[in-house]
Image (cartoon, rainbow, N blue to C red):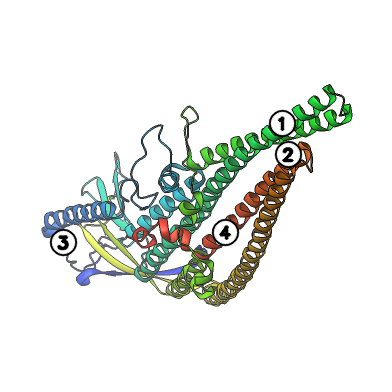
Amino acid sequence: MSLVPRKPQARLAIITSVDGCSVNGMVDPAGTARGPRHTWSGYAPWIAATQVCLIIAMLVMAGGVMCWCRPAQGADQGPVAQTPTPTPGSPLTFEEAVKIAITQSPYFTKSSLDIDITRLDETDSRYAMIPPLTFTTYYYVNRPSGASQGKPYSLSFTTLPYNPLGAYFTLQAQKLATKATILSHLRVISSGLSSLGSCYLTLDAMHKQAGIQKDLIKVAQENLTYAENRVAIGTGTSLEVKMAQQQLQLARGEQEGIALAIKGTLSSLRNLLGWPSNQDITPAFYDSRRQVLGSFNPATVTLEQAKTSSYELKVYDIYKQLQQYNISLAIAKSLPTIVFNTQTPNPLSVSTGYGLYVGLGLEIPVWDGFTRIRNVSRQKALLKQIGAKKGEKENTLEDKWIFNLEKIQEKSVVLKNGQSLEELARLKSHQQEVRYHSGEVPLAVFLESRIEVLRAQKETLRGGLEYDQAVLQFRELSGDLGNTYVDASAWQK
């Protein structure tokens, strides 16, 4: 959300002297004084001392604000769950990986820097609560004849037009903008943790499949040996040997594919963690389902809980509050602004005054083509637009909610069917084993039944991985994943 800049407009400046003191005592061209003028010459040292004290006080306040606004070291990454620092070379659990990712992942750098930038903007708005003061001095080497015979230099302290209400509303808006940026960063973290958990689930499933693939290769090798022995004794054909060779080659090719998949997942995990390329990474992917999903149960989470935890909907709530301040700011811009000036007489004038003179005034907009009035209407329309966008996001969240629930149910059915097929293949293999030992079927039939069991186990693992990943996506959508590892309330401190 951005504040609408003020356009140049015609203004009328009304300057009022303090305590009825004029800015300078003018004389007419004939040299006749228009009357005695009271000056502050006797109070010049006190006024100068007061201004110095005022500047020192402003600097002290500015320093205090800076100290108050400066984030603590490491605050850009936010508070995370306290986990022990992993020992170099030791297996890296999922919780330890979460801590490392939040601390150093390059995928979180941009949104983290966005927080730093908005905090700087907030600090600028906090400083703007104090009117900007400018000191100007001139020294004239020579002056025209007839000019004042006073000091050949001038001093002045001036402020830009100051709108206290506008400065206040701008500061409040910047505070809300910082909160919105923090929530956007937490949303990025939640999505990144989902990808991190998916890597752990995939590594676990792939390593289990690699173990099954070794058994497949072993069985295929036994089948090839059996076929070659049959050819050697004259009871088999070369076609059977070629088929067994192709089966073994296919199993080895699948093993290479699994190894490449593991390598690619490890590379993705390394990138997510921002892990040094010259340092080995050993993720503790065993029992990944318990590590990543924990005790999360999709059946216990409601849509209302997901809406309450949604970072995106929280951002739109803040946008609505921010737009309310934009409306107030648009109204405040139609009010007069305050100007302040403290200066000595101009050495080039024919003034006989001396000392320091203080002036206060108002700067009033006269004509801007009713731009300020239209801006208020514009900001109100933007508020309605934000409300409509929030309603659209709520509908989108509900659609995702229903889709993910249906996906979980679908993957659950596929997983159960895979488990049933695996059990059926195991029973058939046991049957063929009995028939083989009784001499009813050859060894090739029994080995083929063992291959079917191993392939059914791989399909069950694939179905289990797809189900776990669907649950993980649902956990991230519900907000449970981000809330478990990151304390959102601590970011607002």
Amino acid type of the residue tagged 4 in the rendering:
Gln
Query: In 3D space, how far apart are the residues under numbered discs 3 and 2 (Cα atoms)?
Result: 111 Å
- Specify the farthest residue to the top: 232
Residue 116, image x and y in percent? 41, 50
Name which of mark 4 and mark 1 comes first in the sequence: 1
- Residue at the image position 52 percent from the left and 48 percent from the top: 196
Which numbered disc, 2 or 4, marks the residue that appears first in the sequence? 2
Q: Nearer the viewer, mark 3 or mark 4?
A: 4
Please name the residue that numbered disc 3 is placed on.
40
Give SS at disc 3.
loop
Q: Nearer the viewer, residue 173 or 109?
A: 109
Comparing marks 3 and 2, which lies closer to the viewer? 2
Q: Evaluate if marks 1 and 3 touch, with contact meaning CB atoms under 8 Å apart.
A: no
The residue that label 1 is drawn on is 222
Circle 2/circle 1 CB separation < 8 Å: yes
Which residue is painted at 78% across and 34% down in the image? 247
Viewer-side residue, 335 vs 224: 224
